[in-house]
Image: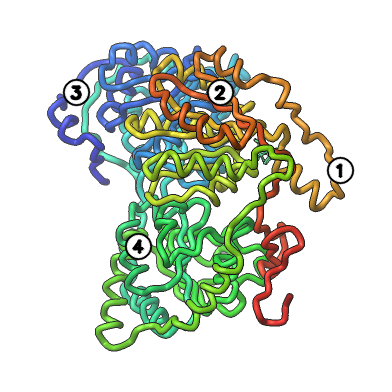
Amino acid sequence: MAKYESGRREKAMTDRSDQQAMSGAASLIRALEESGVDTVFGIPGGAILPAYDPLLDSTRLRHILVRHEQGAGHAATGYAQATGRVGVCMATSGPGATNLVTPIADAHMDSVPLVAITGQVASTHIGTDAFQEADIVGITLPITKHSFLVSKADEIARTVAEAFHIAATGRPGPVLIDITKDALQSATSFSWPVELNLPGYRPVSKPHAKQVREAARMLAEAKRPVLYIGGGVLKARATTEFRVLAELTEAPVVTTLMARGAFPDSHPLHLGMPGMHGTVAAVTALQKADLIVALGTRFDDRVTGKLSSFAPNAKVVHADIDPAEISKNRTADVPIVGDCREVIADLVVAVQAEHAAGRRGDYAGWWEQLNAWRRTYPLGYELPADGSLAPQQVIERIGRLSGPDTIFTAGVGQHQMWASQFISYENPYTWLNSGGAGTMGYAVPAAMGAKVGMPDRTVWAIDGDGCFQMTNQELATCAINGIPIKVAVINNGTLGMVRQWQTLFYGKRYSNTDLHSRRIPDFVKLAEAYGCVGLRCESPDDLDKTIEQAMAVDDAPVVVDFVVHQDAMVWPMVPAGVSNDEILAAQDVRPDFGDGEE
Ligand SMILES: Cc1ncc(C[n+]2csc(CCOP(=O)(O)OP(=O)(O)O)c2C)c(N)n1
């Protein structure tokens, strides 16, 4: 049994008192306070109502009343991704709880620490199809790291402590606490700290030294290595250690969609993002590598393309905190289970030992090749011939004008890929997106959560006109609660990414992708209706001026309707299910790798 240490240990200890009598609901609020929570996003309703009463008296918890539970969930994950702390959301039973399903699934796919608290009908009513009954534990079982159904007041505080411990340790993830109404209403006695009772939950953090030494030896022997890093490097807060490793080895680095910002984009060792819309240099480096050192990443299908043809000549070192990831998709020659920060720190020492023994990798020829690919196939885009706005240009200028400390969130679609490609991420935790689930509607609530967690930072949501229409009701939450986010709606009037696939793979038959959102709704009026500043930009001549106007507003949320050209496409591209060897740098442009495969 482990003793739970809260994020605010000192506070918890000074406030500690033995065995206070209170309701289960009050014990929930106290346990959240003692766990270091400062913000809860949620909406009340019948089953969770007892918890909202003591919440009113809490001076340590800020509850932000959202407009839809999905907004609460994504706000909590945005908060968590920006701050590194556990995000918390709360909903009532039945439809309140099921509205949390998408953000819980999203957090599960992207390993985000989240505690979702739901009210449940009284324990005597469970299984009777009672009003607003839903088996949310059952529904979310496959998409949570762990879930609890609590039907006794005495178990609430310990469950909260366990939930935070599970969400934040090992591979982070969402934990559900479903509490019956009678448990919230019953009397209990509260004491803190509590003993955790989690038999069998012991995530391995310390890597095996022999495996780490083997990885260092392989790095010294390799001719064409690649350091392939994923979101795990950010989750482990290992970016400083990683930079040391990269500069020590001088091996090229690729950062997945979930790892953007983990290594500065401007760094000469950085080749950019791999995968379906990765740079030619990053995709091809992995493809032609003789050694891939994969750190906190999971060989996702969007990275590997057709798995059987992925990096055919590479040996693989794979380090991950979750043993289930190792050799899941690609067999690891050297498996390392451990926390990325510890793995990388140990790897630095092992590589130094190799160097001291005169064994240092010689990658000069490799870099010559990589630099040639970088030079020949840089990321780029064409400006529309009709003088209208290029979406890539809008996103690039927002990135340039807002500076390296700005936090960006994105929806899902073309704008998400362009935001990953054309904004230069120099610092960790500045890029938040829904990578694994690809959840449209993530950007606005996640930006809200990020801004609440990091109030001194500028937060831009780069959103599509489709995504924006899924969760923009949280603008009301932002306006009322003084959360001045900035939203760039990249308005191409269509479900752009789907349209791109229709253009390329369905003979330009545009079935149900036209949103008509240049006409309806009027995003400027919508913004104003929600108490935000609304701006519109339709011409490149007004671009910088409009962004600066949006930047100048710091006391209200701002929405900018950027009316952009409809036909822009995301390049490079590896079509789904195809080998990464088939990457297209642009439409009909197949790179020449000098190996006769043109
Ligand atoms: C909730 C949800 N529904 C459907 C999809 C499928 N999908 C992926 S991208 C996309 C289009 C997004 O359109 P928009 O927000 O306008 O962004 P754009 O691609 O035009 O930049 C759709 C429908 C999804 N990812 N998520």
Q: Secondary structure at mark 1?
A: loop
Residue 432 drawn at (x, y percent) = 47, 42
Q: Which mark sits nearer the N-terminus, 3 or 1?
A: 3
Mark 2–mark 3 distance (CA, rounded to whole Å): 55 Å
Asked whether the beta carbons under mark 1 and mark 2 sit within 8 Å of each other, the answer is: no
43 relative position to 241: left or right: right
- Residue 242 is labelled as 4
Do we see residue 320 in this rendering?
yes
Residue at 66% x, 36% y: name it: 564
Residue 50 drawn at (x, y percent) = 40, 13
Mark 4–mark 3 distance (CA, rounded to whole Å): 46 Å
Residue underneath mark 2: 535
Residue underneath mark 1: 509
Q: Which mark sits nearer the N-terminus, 4 or 3?
A: 3
Mark 3–mark 1 distance (CA, rounded to whole Å): 68 Å
Residue 481 drawn at (x, y percent) = 40, 17
Q: Which mark sits nearer the N-terminus, 1 or 4?
A: 4
Q: Is mark 4 within 8 Å of ligand 1?
A: no
1 or 4: mark nearer the eye: 1
Residue underneath mark 3: 19
In front: 114, or 383?
Answer: 383
3 or 1: mark nearer the eye: 1
Q: Secondary structure at mark 4?
A: helix
Q: Residues within 10 Å of mark 2 (few under 14, many from 20)?
A: many
Residue at 55% x, 68% y: name it: 375
